Amino acid sequence: MLDTRKALGILLVAGLGATLTACSTKGDDSGTDTDGTVTITVDCQPVGAQKELLDNWNADVAAFEQANPDITIKSVSVGEQCNNPPDFTARLAGGTMTDVFYGYMTDLQQVLDSGRALDITSAVSASTVPTWDSVDPALKEVFTDSGKLYAVPVKNYSMGLVYNKTLFTRAGLDPANPPTTWPEVRAAAKKIAALGDGIAGYSEYSAGNTGGWHFTSLLYSQGGRVLSEDGKKADFNNPLGRQVLQNLKDMRYADDSMGDRQLLQWGDLLTSAGAGKVGMFIGAPDATQAIVSQFQGKYEDWAMGPLPGQDGPAKGTLGGGEGYFFKKDLSPEQVEAGLKWIAYQKLTPGKGQLDYVRAKPQNYPVGLPQPLLFANGSDAQKQELELRKANANVDTGNFAAFENNPVPIQGEPRNAQAIYAVLDGAMSGVLTDPKANVDTLLGTAQEKVDQLLAAGS
Amino acid sequence: MSVLTAAARVHEEVTVHPAGSRRRRRILDDLTGHAFLIGAVLCFALFMWYPMIRGVVMSFQRTRRGETTWVGWDNYTRIVADPSFWTAWQNTFVFTVLALVLGYALPFFVAILLNEFRHATGYLRILVYLPVMLPPASALFLFKYYAYDPSEAGLFNAILTAVHLPTSEWMQSPRMTIPAMVIASTWMNMGSAVLIYLASLQNIPGELYEAAELDGAGVWRRIVHVTIPQTRLILALLAMMQIVATMQLFIEPLILANGAGTQDSAVSVAYLIYQHGFFQNDLNGAAALGVIMLLVLAVFSAYYVRLTTRKDDA
């Protein structure tokens, strides 16, 4: 008996010891094998449910590795939404990001604070990313801090008015001429909501930070800014901010044209849109892609116009986008390999995400005015536009009003997510309380944002 | 006589064996025992104690640009100055009190009722326990989209309309947000409490009820004078467990209210921690709030430990 127990004890201790040893074993993390092959891990591989996208990604990896036999790409999927903020923050805090990792433009501050991103200024050039000189300088600037570049932009969007043409027609509105001012939006929303059957003429977010995100865009359309020039004070408690909330309150309660369901966030609104229950909302062109691929909508129903202004064209619209950061401890060879991969998969017309010939027969739109990566008139932009037009599988006329009436793009405020969380309160206030006082809501939000900024969180 | 002989033999064996051999054997036994403990200790150390200590340390630090510095009480003063701080505590306490009133008393009375049934008891118990088997997220989505739909198509509003009562906007109404979360939470969790109460009720000797009946006690007096005193300890334990669990209110606001709800009407302390940590690039502030919450919950946990110790002693 004693022998058995003794043996068991020794086995257990040995097992634990072996486990700990295995856990603590640190391999060579230079990413270069003895045969000279450089390995990098890259996230944002599509998930299994996105079959065509996943097949495209895997084909891209195979083609890239064949062309670059000394580079191995290890793909990592982090979910259907490549950047779900809580997951992203957790990975960043834990240092478990991939070597080359995807982030939003608004993530730059937290990526820098984590101290885990590499300054890639000297590594990026036309020799590592052939289309680099064509990439819109404004996008490079977004990922630059104190003159140092920390990410390569791979997607860019700006917001406009997304509308359901079928509902426009049913409501007696002209689907070729979307509203261009907020009073016109209000009138159109009233007519669409009059169709009944739970249809909202205009729908808006007010939860999960998305309310604040859209408030920002609506404020830009009025010519306002969320923060003062020096970024130290809230700057939305003014007639422009009041107009934003008043427009929404009027549509919600005076006209009853925004539906009963509020406290919506991204998936809620797009689910209703996919079900044909939303006449208009503000969004980026690829919102239509999500409506079709994730929420069972139809491309032919959707069109897009520029973001409306109060009395004329909008004075600004919110722009955003994504890029790839590089982990701090990468070797120069890994950085070069990562840049080559991004150049191939994201920034080469006719390849990867810009391979429109491949995408045309698939259930993903070609012809949307996105990703707006290249500067106007640049060589890469011309190539990309030609390919996009030649292979369009959606009616590009549906986006003509948006493309032909560009609105000045404004970036997101510093500390965007924290501010959006506060502004959710103002948005939910006017959308759920008929007695809501717009001044009080803005005053409270201003006080909170000022406190946030003062605390520097 | 034989007992004495046996005792003498044991004494003889003990004195015959050298002391060193006994010590070795005891050490070996101890080592084996400790080896079996290592797994559990490592798990606790890695996944419970280390994160807890790390959380406390982080609450006194600030990380900016990859540099971590000690900032004293800064994170605490900053988190207390957060405009949502007191709202979150108020909402959490109101939820806890309401959940205690509804989610604590209701299962007790359901258990008493089930205890009285003589037929279909197994079926009824499964029925009561069924919601516990549903993943909380699924249950809450059911409430969100079917029961709390603010239109007349919503289940609760349809019922209210049918009985000619005014409808509610449920999660969209700041006044109804917390009661609506309490209703959903009680529905999801009461099954476990009912089963624990039932087990406790079945331990009460039937003679006590018979005696009470002979003394002319009605149902209510039997509950007050027999059932409650006999289950007092279990009632107290479950109350403490419920307080500690409900004060960590998180998934209800996250799913039912998509976060903070209408003008912070659903924001809870745990949700505020999540908000700071994962949306506001403020893990240190989140850690500070976590420590404050830990201290508050420690008071209730200490009382819980005292109660369980008393139960063990009993």
Image (spheres, coloured by chain):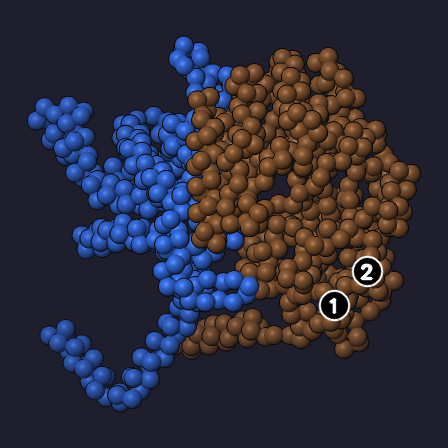
Cα separation between marks 1 and 2: 12 Å
Outermost residue to the left: B215
Q: Amino acid at mark 2?
A: Val
Residue A129's tag is: 2
Q: Residues within 10 Å of mark 1 (few under 14, many from 20)?
A: few
B284 or B253: nearer the viewer: B284
Nearest to the observer: residue A449 or residue B161 = A449
Which element is circle 1 on? loop
Q: Chain of mark 1?
A: A
Chain B hue? Answer: blue
| Percent of width and height locating residue B68 | 48, 66
Q: Is residue A451 above or below residue A98?
A: above
Label of residue B17 in the image: none
- Asked if A390 appears above or below A183 in the picture, the reply is below
Q: Is residue A311 above or below residue A22?
A: above
Have a look at marks 1 and 2 and say if they share a chain. yes
Question: Residue B132: in sight, yes or no?
Answer: no
Q: Is residue B164 left or right of residue A213?
A: left
Q: What element does badge 2 sit on?
A: loop
- Write the residue at 78% across / 29% down: A401
Q: Nearer the viewer, residue A5 or B46?
A: B46
Q: Position of residue A150 (x, y in %)?
A: 67, 60
One can see residue A430 in this view: yes
Q: Position of residue B164 (x, y in %)?
A: 41, 10
Q: Which residue: 65% across, 70% down?
A: A329
What residue is shown with label 1?
A122
Q: Amino acid at mark 1?
A: Ser
In the figure, residue B92 lies in which quadrant?
Answer: top left
* Chain of the residue under label 2: A
Query: x and y percent of residue A2 in the render?
Result: 39, 77
Sequence-wise first label, 1 or 2 = 1
Name the colour assigned to chain A in the rendering: brown
